[in-house]
Image (cartoon, rainbow, N blue to C red):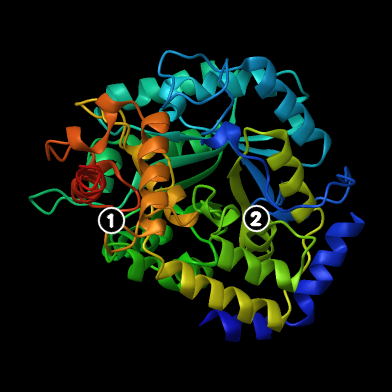
Amino acid sequence: MDRRTFIKGLGGAVAASAAMAAGCNHTNAVQAEGYTPGEVPTDKMSMRTDAHGQQVSFLGFGMMRLPVEGGGDLRSNPEAKLDQEAINQLVDYAIAHGVNYFDTAPVYLKGMSEEATGIALSRHPRDKWLVATKMSNFRDWSYEASVKMYHKSFEYLQVDHIDYYLLHSFGGVDSEGKSDFEKRFVDNGVLDFLVKEREAGRIRNLGWSFHGQQEEFDKVVAMHDKYHWDFAQIQMNYVDWRYAHEIEPENVNAEYLYNALLERDIPIVIMEPLLGGRLGKLNEHMAAMLKEQDPNRSLASWAFRHLGMYPRILTALSGMNLMEHLQDNIRSCAPLEPLSEADLELLDRVADEFAHFPAIPCTSCQYCMPCPYGLDIPGIFAHYNKCLNEGDIASEGTVEQREFRRARRAFLTSYDASVERLRQADHCIDCGACVTHCPQNIAIPEKMHMIEDYTNKLKDSLV
């Protein structure tokens, strides 16, 4: 079923559900773009119902990108600590305005996210929030290490049950054709253990998150008959709906993932609704297309309203380390307003242009970090994409061209300001340690050499 057919089939049902809901630089330097400040509703959050009848806020709080002391982030300031006071304020505000789903993992923020999340949430009554965390046994998937990680999550989160527990980020196979899902969860007995924990009530919903090959996705979806998945987490947004595979051939279009889960009636959690913030910071032309249609909505709001058209989606996770972002996202989801046919057609055009824009599809998830040789991989990609968005990538031509000189100066000056020289692309040695960890399947060394070659070209033109 394609999106257009699906949306037409929904018709007035979507509008009715929205009405019912109404009744019932770097990350820290970025402002929420293009929204009109105003009231942030406290009682209009759109809610969805999970497999056990629990009400879930459509806007979920992703605890992978959180404030750090002194500003910046852990990538640019590796020794920094999380700013617990700022995290508490964001969580307090979210709960007060109807957000009740909080997603973390043992590996987020150098292992500090779960504890910070537990501190912030434990200050509120337990029935006011739902917490999700994960079995992130990427490096040591022995039964003993995995069970230890599981119990540590309870300790850090200060809970006696976990509302949503995920088998974290599967989808690949090793050189012998063995899937990482089988190695990390099945062969070692970990999945059987977690099923028993669900039976005991210590896990309320058991599911998984996917990044990888379609064949592996299909295998795990088929396991629903045996394990009765309570939910699944996929990457979905108005670009990845049809263009994920076109942007990176190893990726699977969200249209396929959503419809496969819909067929099995498995509730869906969405990650990367804004592609690591990139859909909230479109280039000037794409932003103008959306602003012309509705000048008072933020760019980010279009992404949430698009997801709101799909009724099997429980919640859409957003990393919000600025109050402006949190407020804007709450406005977008409290309540969700359905898109018109004209809106959908516009998003199709924006998605097509975005997919063919030569940006690097990095979402700054930092799964590739730390680099063994010290490269700031997400920072390098963020700088390149920012310059691309702002027209500061020099086009081919002679060095005498005024535009070339301006773009060259802008790129080189801001590169050194954004990324330490010892952590720039020219220090990549093709070790490949980052490649298998990238959820977007980016050929990272290849992109590093592209940026290195481009940077050298600009420097050579100065001579």
Side (left or right) of 406 relative to 343? left
Q: Which quadrant of the structure image shows residue 397?
A: bottom left
Q: Residue 196, how many percent across, how many down? A: 45, 36
Q: Residue at x 65, y 80 (%)?
A: 7
* Disc 1 packing (10 Å; few <14; some 14–19; many ≥20): some
Q: Residue under circle 1?
A: 399
* Residue type, mark 1 in image: Val
Q: Is residue 448 above or below residue 88?
A: below
Closer to the chain start, of discs 2 and 1, is 2
Q: Tag 1, which secondary structure?
A: loop
Residue nearer the viewer, 198 or 290: 290
Q: Which quadrant of the structure image shows residue 338?
A: bottom right
Q: Which residue is drawn at 12% across and 54% down?
A: 177
* Residue type, mark 2 in image: Ala
What number is the disc on residue 300? 2
Q: Residue furthest left?
A: 176
Q: Tag 2, which secondary structure?
A: helix
Q: Residue 310, how many percent across, how many down? A: 63, 68
